[in-house]
Image (cartoon, rainbow, N blue to C red):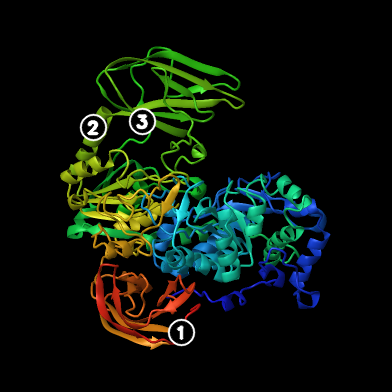
Amino acid sequence: MSDTVSRRSALRLLGGAVTVAAAATGPLAAPARALSLTPASRRVEALIARLSPDEKVGLLHGADDPGKLGQAGYVPGVPRLSIPPLRLADGPAGVRVTAHATALPAPVMLASAFDPALAREYGEVIGREGRALGQDVLLSPMVNLIRTPYAGRNYETFSEDPLLGADLVAEEIRGIQSQGLVATVKHFALNNQEKDRMSIDVRIAEQPLRELELRGFEAAVAAGAGAVMGAYNKVNGTFACENKPILGDILRDGWGFDGWVMTDWFAAHSTVAALTAGLDMEMPSGNYFADALKKAVLDGSVPEALVDRSVRRILSVMDRFGLLDGSAPARPGRDPRAGARTALKVAKAGATLLHNRHATLPLTGRAARTIAVIGPTGTIPFVSGGGSAHVVPDHAQSPLDAIGARAGEGAHVDYALGEDLFGKPLPGTSAGADFEGQGVAPGATWTYDGTLTVDDADEWTFCIHYSGDRPKVLLEGTELFPPAPGLGELFAGGLVGAAPDGLTVRRSTLNLTAGTHRLAVTAKGRDKGQLFRLRRTTGATRAADVAEAVRAARAADSVVLFAYEDATEGADRTSLALPGHQSELIEAVAAANSRTTVVLNTSSCTTMPWLDRVGAVLQMYYPGQEGAEATAAVLFGDCDPGGRLTQTFPVAEDRHPMAGDPRRYPGVDGTEEYSEGIHLGYRWYDAEDVTPLFPFGHGLSYTTFEYADLSVRPDGDGLAVGFTVRNTGRRPGTTVAQVYLGPSPDLRLDQARRALAGYRRLELEPGREQRVTVRISARSLSSWDPERHGWVLGTGTREVSVGVSAREPRLVGPGRVRSRAAAGRP
């Protein structure tokens, strides 16, 4: 695929009427004369004329939902004028409400398929289910770039590459909105980390801002996104939700966006500045856009025309989706089977085989006779990440069950825990407590004041499982599980934050000396009562679990070891290594059985000091409710692993773009500098001559492919790159042909050594070949000139390469770019 449409003319071709007044960006813009208005515009203007000042303001902020469905936000309508309320649900990987929904694979896994058509299908599932579950607005997709490998929400977005992200976000939005659900692209802009996200000031130059971060948002606008969500952070000194250069100058004036802009939750910081800059809606409440806004209108600091402008934008989108005139189609019923089919399809397509030594995979013949499954996520389905990405799935099979079913009756599948997530019963306490299942009646308070006896000095991890208010646990007078600061209590992870029976889990690790320690516990039943458990893991229990895993590995022909990393909104990772003691487990198991496959359920890139010791590594991210079946299908070779990396994996913690420079990440004194400029992701590895562990675009197949016959020719205002791909192996397989573009000799601007300019996902039977043409657009051939404040075409002879990753070119040739596209907007 090449670029998504980005020309302003494309905006006028979108479904639904575009009001003349909504396109105006001046602070006192008034509606055009009635003769120039469409019927939809006249309907909106008539409503605005009838709305009272209080009713107008009521449409510009969130409120409590009287009929709660578990969604993130609610905006009351105006019943007397038949303006319905709006319900807004999270949904990066499925609709997040209290009801069951299809839990799709994480967006990063969708992106790994390099398939915009699949992104549209993914969006269609979410769009249909959102409406079926009573929602009107989806708070998704996210298109912020993967900049730092530590970012806690890397799995919720697509890629470190702006072209790939732009293509996918555009198609997902088209899919969502084709079902009648309003899509909200987020987080505008530069919300590329969770650490200090509420306050960090992101400093970025004009060229990288335009060429990298904004490309996906521009594509989303061109695709017709109804809403944009402003980010928490500041951009060049001003909070994003009151930042006129990005909300007014770029989003409105530059791209012609005619939808509405809402805050991220609790991201508003002002009334007058925010409304003037272009913010339309405060969520989830009205600290600045309720009484404060009414007061600002009354005292003249905010012209009522600005309030009308925001109301107009919201009502215009509602009218475009048939919510004002009753033309919206009836809400459909859910189709769980169709959702499950798409979830399985995406998980298979995005499964990425990173390493496969000595044909460890697929599991066939003797290798599939006896299999040891190891790791906690072998029995606990890892469906999704934490925070706003969490979905209540229709079902989720465990990988152990899926592998056992696929292996068949003639095979033997054994299991060993390996790494304990939820702890073992607490020994050595004085009498009076049942820490394995202590009930507390409603209204009651249960207390324990006793001792804990430790036989040997060791590292202890205490685990508290609870169903109500978290019990207070004091060890030697120090609280083990204090409340997390800020919103941390809301974001506890998608896997480790809950026990298999649904109890909430928190952990605390410390070193204990041998001897007796005072332990005090207080648990309150409150209105509903509660059940809690207090458990532990220690060095001794871990050693026993590893020994059991090693025994299972030695007895098996093959090992499938499931490893995890549990990411969540609200917190960045502190290390790129697997958490806990999983690396030691992998090394011990691989030493016992070289045919060990590590299946990674991780959010983002992971360092692998154990890589040379294992047979295979299969990256499955957070694979959704059908992840177990998809994993088994890839392991046994029922389908080719079709995914490719959308981000670079570094060799070590000190070998990536953010390493060693706290000004780049996480920031110093509240300011973060994007000093890498345009050299994001794989571009940085090229510029610095740093070898990654796995490059952008990398992924292995169970077959082999040959690339031949490169041709590069002018094609309108771009280039057409032709080549032939042939499956030279014995199995059907998938390859992703990636076209990279070198710098222009005629531009004095900073340029990447190579940048993705197009791609094509191909599925070929053995011996079959296909002639492919990938078009490089004028946008990909252009750079942003900060002196001209516009795009300039990179003319001259430029290197064009076709490969299977950013570091693996198969074909290289020249492409001549002539100055047919003038400076300006390509």
Residue 433 lies in what quarter of the image?
Answer: top left
Query: Around disc 2, counting alpha carbons within 10 Å, would you say few (fewer than 14), some (14 to 19), or many (20 or more)?
Result: some
Q: Is there CB contact under 8 Å for labels 2 and 3?
A: no
Quarter of the figure with residue 49: bottom right
815 relative to 687, above or below: below
Marks 3 and 1, how far apart in space? 64 Å
Residue type for callout 3: Gly
Q: Which quadrant would residue 542 be assigned to in this image?
A: top left
Mark 3 element type: loop
Residue at coordinates 16% horizontally, 44% vertically from top-left? 591
* 452 in relation to 771, above or below: above
Q: Residue 464 at what x, y percent from top left?
A: 43, 28
Mark 1 → mark 2, Cα distance in angstroms: 66 Å
**Where is 181 relative to 265, above or below?**
below
Nearest the camera: 316 or 551? 316
Pointers 1 and 2 in contact (C-beta within 8 Å): no
Give the Cα separation between the discs numbered 2 and 3. 13 Å
Q: Nearer the viewer, mark 3 or mark 1?
A: 1
| 778 on left or right of 764 | right
In this view of the protein, can residue 77 be seen by the observer?
no
Q: Looking at the rendered structure, which numbered label has been put on residue 624?
A: none
> Which class describes the residues within 10 Å of circle 3: few (<14), some (14-19), or many (20+)?
many
Instruction: Identify which amino acid the numbered label 1 is placed on.
Output: Ala
Which residue is disc 2 drawn over?
543
Query: Which labelled disc corresponds to residue 821?
Result: 1
706 and 212: which is toward the camera = 212
Residue 66 percent coordinates (x, y): 71, 44
Q: Position of residue 200 (x, y in %)?
A: 47, 48
**Is residue 427 in view?**
yes
Which numbered disc covers residue 423? 3
